[in-house]
Image (cartoon, coloured by chain):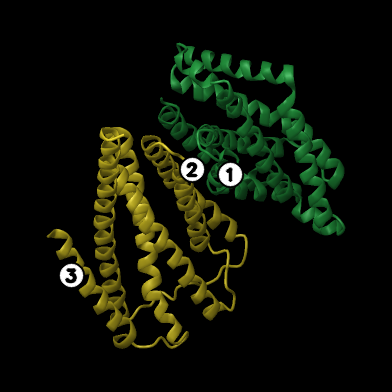
Chain colours: A yellow, B green
Amino acid sequence: MKRKVLFFISSGLLLASFYMVLVFVPTEKDMGIVQRIFYYHVPLAWIAFLAFFVVFFASIGYLIKRKPLWDHIACASAEIGLVFISLMLLTGMIWAKAAWGAWWIWEPRLTTSLVLWFIYVAYFIVRAYVIEEERKARFGAVVGIIGFLNVPLVFLSVTLWRTQHPPLTIFTEGLVGSMMATLMVCLVAFNFFYFYLLAEGTLMKADERTVKQLKEESIRRNP
Amino acid sequence: MREIAKACVIAAKDMLTEIRTREVISSVVVFAVLVIVIFNFAFGSNQQAAGLVAPGIIWVTFAFAGILSLNRSFVLEKEEDCIEGLMVAPISREAIYLGKFFGNLLFIFLIQAIVIPVFSLLFNVGFFNIELVLITILASVGFASVGTLFAAMAVSTRARELVLPILFFPVITPVIIAAVNASAVILGGGVLSDITQWLGIIGAFDIIFIVASYLVFCFIIEE
């Protein structure tokens, strides 16, 4: 029931955001139509980092409580986070090409996101190469914790590194009222969408675990 | 204090094994020198370019060589089930982590002591001042702190040689950025006061990740 509510709220908000980004908001005068990517790029980035924080929190929860539900939350959040951060990098690259003519620049936020992408991938690779369920969850939890602690340090070191070079202006910070409203709608829409996906993902993993246990039990009973 | 004494016993055991067999140091040193030689083929023809990229080359070499020696430290334990012996012994899991950490750190220092003079020779770059030694010591502590934790994890997975680099490199990014930039400043004629921010980043990394790995290690090697 709650999932249905989340689904309808997030779909409604996402549709509203499509309308606002594509029709409602005026075109920015410097960059033209491409600037509309910004309204998706920012929420994607926010959700990717939020998802990783949830992985960190759920990893600690699993190591303390040892209940499989925590591991399901962590893994589902990591999956969603990986998709969102990949999309964030792609939208960032499209925007960079249109705005500055280069597909990639070593800008602090993009670089930190790239390293975070690799940490997410490492999370899944470690889980993939471990066979026992319990150990898989434990190792994943450790990667989630260490990886999260690493992100602020990466941002700090890359920012210090890039200030040695001439800075690039990223955001012209003046946002008109309609632009701010569009950005807020997109942000809220993606938040609800993330929580909906997290709920679905967690419950799906719990169901997978139940199915696996039932299979093993039936094999045990009828060898 | 007793815990540190027990940790030193473990480190001494690793050192003794190494003195008797000499297998890690010899192969890793040869590997590191080979990497430097290959980099020389890539950059060395232009003397000016070689001077610019020298700090980067030495740190990439240390990162790769570090991975090899970190891997070996736990592979030996795994092969003869020594890790179970360690767990049954009257020492805490944290002392095992500290012992392995000290052992790995000493190995890294030994390798660096041999590789740095060779590098200075081949690249005509002086590496013998106190600031560079300080940078090297701090960065090596960072390598060993997360490297020991990740090596313990990787050795329990099905593809240990693959998993350790994938885990290690993203997390070690702040140390690499800081060490390379600080080394470049010193080699370019800077003094200690110029690199305080970089040293601060490496120092913060060391403290955060020694503490985090110390706390989390018991979850990796539990049965």
* Residue designated by label 3: A8
Q: What element carries label 3?
A: helix
Q: Which of the 4 image quadrants contains residue B132?
A: top right
* Residue designated by label 2: A129
Q: Which of the 4 image quadrants contains residue A163?
A: bottom right
Residues packed near mark 1 inside 10 Å, few (<14), some (14 to 19) or many (20 plus): some
Same subunit, tags 2 and 1: no
Is mark 2 in CB contact (under 8 Å) with mark 1?
yes
Q: Which of B74 and B197 is in front in this view?
A: B74
Q: Which chain carries label 1?
A: B
Q: Which chain carries label 3?
A: A
| Marker disc for residue B162 | 1
Q: Distance between the residues labelled 2 and 1?
A: 10 Å
User: Which amino acid, mark 2?
Assistant: Tyr
Same subunit, tags 3 and 1: no
Please name the residue shown 30% across and 43% down the image. A212
